[in-house]
Image (cartoon, helix red, strand yellow):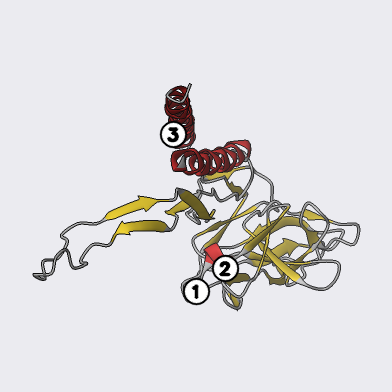
Amino acid sequence: MRALYTSATGMAAQELNVQVISNNIANLRTTGYKKQRAAFQDLIYQHVRRVGAQASDQGTILPVGIDIGGGVKTVGTPRLMTQGTLSPTGNDLDIAIRGEGYFKIQMPDGTYTYTRDGSFQMDAQGRVVNAQGNLLQPTITIPQNASGITINAQGQVSVNVPGSTTPTVLGQIGLTRFVNKAGLQPIGDNLFTETPASGPPQDGVANLDGFGDMQQGNLEQANVEVVSEISDLIAAQRAYEMNAKVISAADQMMQSTANLFR
């Protein structure tokens, strides 16, 4: 019976939906995390009677047809790249982006990745790196005797050094944006890579030409809303249960049919 296979696709789709929701909830406190959602489409139809077909020799047309659906399929798990809440930390090297843009990170093999996670540290040479020790681009090196690190809204990094009455500018942290942010490929560690779907990276300066500004001493929180995720989880669970009920009903109907031959 076709209903068995149709409902099975529904159960598989809702199982994936629950996996996506669980990942969102698991990353509730992940800095810069962008939530995902599961997107579905209906499967191909069997057209028993095609709508608009000729119904008689007199040329009458069928106003409706008979189309039997094959179920549901998952077409993607797009990310919602909306702004997360900024949370103050008090750490001089914590930077949040308010608006458009990503930090550029250089990987050990020389390639670049991109992130909204602005929780940076210094390595043994005083260079600004992310949690995995990969360099923030452009490279910023903070002198050992420096104090009072200041990062303004445009990403300009200044420090106080002994013997100087004015702050010393060390460099400027840039931002990168993409035409299609949802087309970026997540690789873990809060990092993304460009893809043909995202378009090429566009480097720029914070707070100019449509780029967001930088907020020192803050971190961007995940854009996951707990209440929304819980309600979506309940809806997915109920949809799974209803598809399972259809399979049970179809099984009972097949059993009743089989009993007629006894």
State the residue in front, 225 or 152: 225
| Disc number placed over residue 154 in the picture, else none | 2
Q: Which residue is mark 1?
A: 208
Q: Report the front residue among 109 and 52.
A: 52
Label ID, residue 239: 3
Residue that sits furthest to the right in the current view? 124
Q: Is residue 197 above or below residue 43?
A: below
Give the x, y percent position of residue 154. 57, 68
Callout 2, which amino acid?
Gln
Drawn side of residue 248 relative to residue 167, left or right = left
Q: Which circle's residue, 2 or 3, is located before the other in the chain?
A: 2
Q: Quadrant of residue 3?
A: top left
Outermost residue toward the front?
Answer: 262
Does the image show residue 85?
yes
User: In what element is the residue under mark 1?
Assistant: loop
> Foreground mark, 1 or 3?
3
Residue 52, image x and y in percent?
20, 66
Percent across and percent down for residue 121 are 78, 53
- Three-letter amino acid code at disc 3? Ala
Does 252 sit above or below residue 138?
Answer: above
Q: Are marks 2 and 1 in contact (CB under 8 Å)?
A: yes
